Image (cartoon, grey):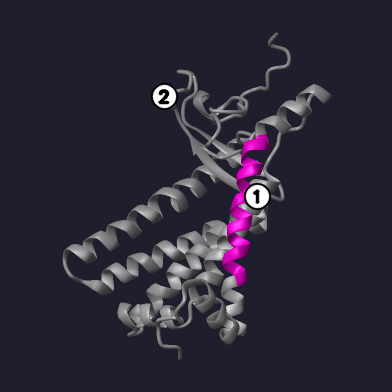
C-alpha cells in the first residue's frame, strides 16, 4: 500500500504534502486538477507568490484605503486603490503568462482534520482567461485611482461614465467574459478510466452551466458597450424604444 505513495519532498512540512483532493476540499472553484508543489523550491515559490500577491499586498492596500478614508486623506486612499489594482494586474498577468494559478487551501467546516493548509497549483489553458479577468479588473481600478491622483475628481469620473457608458460596460464585459471562459474551460485531473472521465464531466457540469450564464451576460454588456461607443445614435434609439425616453445624461 505504501509503495505507490509519493515521497515527501525535502524541506516541506508534512502539512504541505499530499494529493489534490477533488470536490469540496479544493479551493472554492470548479477545479479538480490541482496539485501540490513537487519540490521544496516550488513550494517556496508558491508560498511567496500567494502570500505576497493574495495576502500581504491586498491587506496593505486595503489598510491604506481604510486609513485614508478615516483621516480624510483621499490621496492615501487613492494610493491604496492604485496598489490594489496593480496587485490584481500582477497576479493576473503572471497567471496568464505562466498558465498556472496558485492558491492556499486550509481546513473548512466540511473538510477533514488532516487537511491542513496547503498550496495548490492549477496548470492549463484556463489560467489564461482567469488571469485576464484579474488583470482587467485590476487595470480598471488602478486607472481610476491614477486619474484621481492626477487631479480628476470622483464626480468628473462619474459624469464621464454616464456620458459615455462604454467606459464601464466594455471593461466589465471583458472581465466577465474572461471569467466565464475560465469556468467553461476549467482545470481537470487526468482521468483514470472511462468511468472516471464521465465522473469528472459530471463534476464540472454545474460550473460549465454557470459559465454559459456568465458568458451570456458578458456578451450582452460588450454588445451594448460597443454599440454605444461606435454608434451612439443607435444606442440612443434603442434606449428610447425600451424605456420611452432618451438617454438622460448629457453626451460629450
- In this picture, is 198 found above or below 229? above
Mark 1 and mark 2: Cα distance apart in space: 30 Å
Comparing 116 with 213, the one in front is 213
Q: Is residue 81 magenta?
A: no
Extreme-left residue of the structure: 71
Q: Which residue is mark 1?
A: 212
Q: Quadrant of the N terminus?
A: top right
Q: Is residue 215 magenta?
A: yes
Where's residue 61, x and y in %?
34, 60
Where's residue 144, x and y in %?
41, 74
Cβ–Cβ under 8 Å for marks 1 and 2: no
Stretch of the chain drawn in magenta: 204-223
Residue at (43, 27) in percent of width and height: 108
Where's residue 116, x and y in %?
47, 26
Comparing 132 with 242, the one in front is 242
Q: Main secondary structure of the magenta part?
A: helix
Where's residue 201, x and y in %?
73, 33
Residue at (40, 65) in percent of width and height: 83
SS category of the residue bearing label 1: helix
Q: Is residue 59 something one can see in this rendering?
A: yes
Q: Which mark is residue 239?
A: none
Extreme-right residue of the structure: 194
Extreme-top residue of the structure: 1
Tell me if 21 is positioned left or right of 64 in this view: right
SS category of the residue bearing label 2: loop
Mark toward the start of the polypeptide (1 vs 2): 2
Give the class, few, some or many, for how many residues have Cα within 10 Å of label 2's Cα (few <14, many ≥20): few
Q: Is residue 94 something one can see in this rendering?
A: no
Comparing 200 with 221, the one in front is 221
Q: Which residue is mark 2?
A: 109
Determine which quarter of the picture holds residue 153.
bottom left
Amino acid at each position: 500500500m505504501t509503495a505507490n505513495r509519493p515521497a515527501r519532498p525535502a524541506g516541506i512540512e508534512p502539512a504541505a504534502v499530499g494529493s489534490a483532493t477533488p470536490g469540496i476540499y479544493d479551493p472554492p472553484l470548479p477545479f479538480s486538477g490541482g496539485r501540490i508543489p513537487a519540490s521544496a523550491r516550488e513550494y517556496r515559490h508558491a508560498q511567496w507568490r500567494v502570500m505576497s500577491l493574495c495576502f500581504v499586498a491586498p491587506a496593505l492596500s486595503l489598510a491604506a484605503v481604510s486609513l485614508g478614508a478615516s483621516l480624510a486623506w483621499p490621496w492615501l486612499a487613492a494610493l491604496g486603490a492604485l496598489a490594489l489594482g496593480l496587485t490584481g494586474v500582477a497576479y493576473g498577468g503572471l497567471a496568464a503568462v505562466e498558465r498556472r494559478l496558485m492558491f492556499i487551501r486550509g481546513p473548512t467546516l466540511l473538510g477533514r482534520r488532516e487537511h491542513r493548509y496547503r498550496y495548490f497549483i492549477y496548470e492549463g489553458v484556463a489560467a489564461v482567461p482567469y488571469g485576464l479577468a484579474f488583470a482587467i479588473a485590476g487595470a480598471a481600478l488602478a486607472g481610476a485611482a491614477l486619474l484621481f491622483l492626477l487631479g480628476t475628481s470622483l464626480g468628473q469620473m462619474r459624469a464621464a461614465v454616464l456620458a459615455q457608458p462604454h467606459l464601464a460596460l466594455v471593461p466589465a464585459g471583458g472581465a466577465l467574459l474572461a471569467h466565464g471562459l475560465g469556468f467553461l474551460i476549467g482545470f481537470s485531473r487526468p482521468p483514470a478510466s472511462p468511468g472516471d472521465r464521465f465522473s469528472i464531466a459530471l463534476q464540472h457540469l454545474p460550473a460549465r452551466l454557470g459559465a454559459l450564464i456568465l458568458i451570456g451576460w458578458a456578451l450582452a454588456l460588450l454588445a451594448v458597450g460597443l454599440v454605444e461607443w461606435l454608434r451612439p445614435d443607435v444606442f440612443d434609439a434603442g434606449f428610447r424604444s425600451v424605456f420611452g425616453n432618451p438617454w438622460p445624461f448629457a453626451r460629450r
